[in-house]
Amino acid sequence: MVGEAPLIGVLALQGGFQAHAKMLRGLGAQVREVRVPRDLDGLQGLVIPGGESTTMTLGIEREGLAEPLRALAASGTPLLGSCAGLIMLDREHLSVMDIRAERNAFGRQTKSFEADLDVAGLEGGPLRGIFIRAPWIAEHGAEVEILARVDGHAVAAREGDMLVVAFHSELSDDDRVHRLFLRAVARQRAAVA
Amino acid sequence: MRDEATFRVKSGLAEMLKGGVIMDVVTPEQAKVAEDAGAAAVMALERVPADIRRDGGVARMSDPEMIVGIQEAVSIPVMAKARIGHFVEAQVLQALDVDYIDESEVLTPADESNHIDKWPFKAPFVCGATNLGEALRRIGEGAAMIRSKGEAGTGDIVEAVRHMRRIGGEIRRLTMLDEAELATAAKDHGAPLDLVRGVARDGKLPVVLFCAGGIATPADAALMMSLGAEGVFVGSGIFKSEDPPVRARAIVEATTHWQDPERIAAASRGLGSAMVSLESSKLEDEQLLAQRGW
């Protein structure tokens, strides 16, 4: 199986799922939109996009997706969460990462911004982060590695093969965060093979 | 380097609303009902379009007191409407930290020739359109999101279908034209040539396109998604129906599962009666809101 295009799911209940799908396809992945539990079968990685976290929480509840998503994370399948996706993975939501997100931490839309970020582990200079009513990581456990900060606040982190960013690189043309995620997917597939 | 209010930041919020339902609310209690039903955002206004139609008179920006009350009641984005051309109402809404400003034909226009110059604002704008030229003129003025107008407050989907089909058809036709023909098309649509070129190249608008005006049922919402809407606004359709929380949840579910008729059928069961509706073809010309805007 290694060498073939990986099959990546993008949670498509609501939010910016199409921009992630486009970026992943551009990097050679097959993409499946995930709306119900059976859409998770056979995935080698999953992206939880930005959107409204309350809307997404209610959708996950309605579709019975919480347990299957936790099982997917527990199986070691690489996950990427951006913005609301970061919130969904925190202690108070799906509780698969040892982080606590502070919602809308940077403020309302008029406080939304773009900034150049130094992200640990990303080569090629600063990454342009697009922050939209963005959260930050207010607390985290010892296993969590913080990869980037804005004004001292953690905005990117990794725990095992789970990667979260408070910003939207899928809205830019910089695909390095997605490459990092797909590298974890490739490592996992090699390990399984 | 840090920049606020770039166009990517403004249009990016609309990207995050995709696949979602934006609901009109007139009180903090309604806003909470909308949020608990899964609304991606709420539109704070003083009267829903059905009541504006019934009561008549000048419809203006909402009381800031009410908008602040709604902002305090929910954590999802709060949008609010300004009159067409009323840039001071828009400045007030921005000062209130509203997340999106709707320069809306549902309110009584303040300027019969000009829309607001939306570029200087930090808050993003959504504007209505009945055709591609109108959409591109609004984007040229700085709108970061477009919604088809439909005919607000009627519960009749026919105008929304007309506008979405027209915008979609005009986009598809542009993709077949050569460079010389695009210049003529820009003139015919009354739209900026660079935006016309972009649409011809990408086969879509440069910003997110939602549908508004006349959605009353889950099937209406799914219909508009199938016609190319990337999400829906529901005005009077929820809080003028018999059982708003149940109908709101059903419309959210149908908007997510618009490609699955069985899910739409399940969501449509036991909703009680829809809003009292008006056939838009029976309305007098001066009662048509979609004709406002230039």
Image: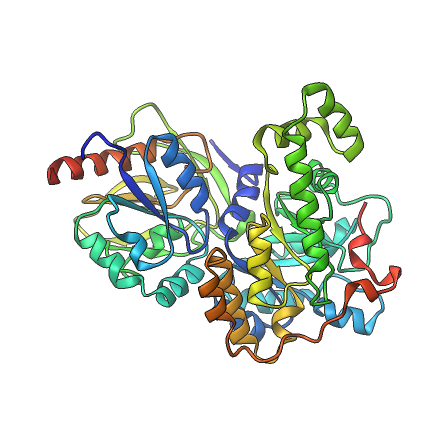
User: Where is residue B273, by image quadrant?
Assistant: bottom right
Residue found 30% across the figure and 32% down from its top:
A179
Q: Which one is in front, A111 or A85?
A: A85
Residue A177 x, y percent position in the rendering: 33, 35
Residue at x 56% of width, y 48% of height = A110
Visible residue check, residue B120? no
Q: Residue at x 44, y 30 (%)?
A: A173
Q: Is residue A36 left or right of residue A130?
A: left
Tell me: B4 left or right of A17. Answer: right
Residue situated furthest top in the rendering: B180
Residue A101 is at least partly visible in this image = yes
Compare residues A13 and B93 and report the one nearer the observer.
A13
Classify residue A169 by image quadrant.
top left
Residue A165: x, y in percent?
35, 44
Q: Is residue B102 above or below residue B235?
A: above
Task: Pinpoint residue A86: horizontal percent, then vertical percent.
Answer: 34, 51
Q: Name the residue located 75 percent from the left edge and 29 percent from the top edge.
A: B185
Please tell me which residue lies in front, A162 or A145.
A162
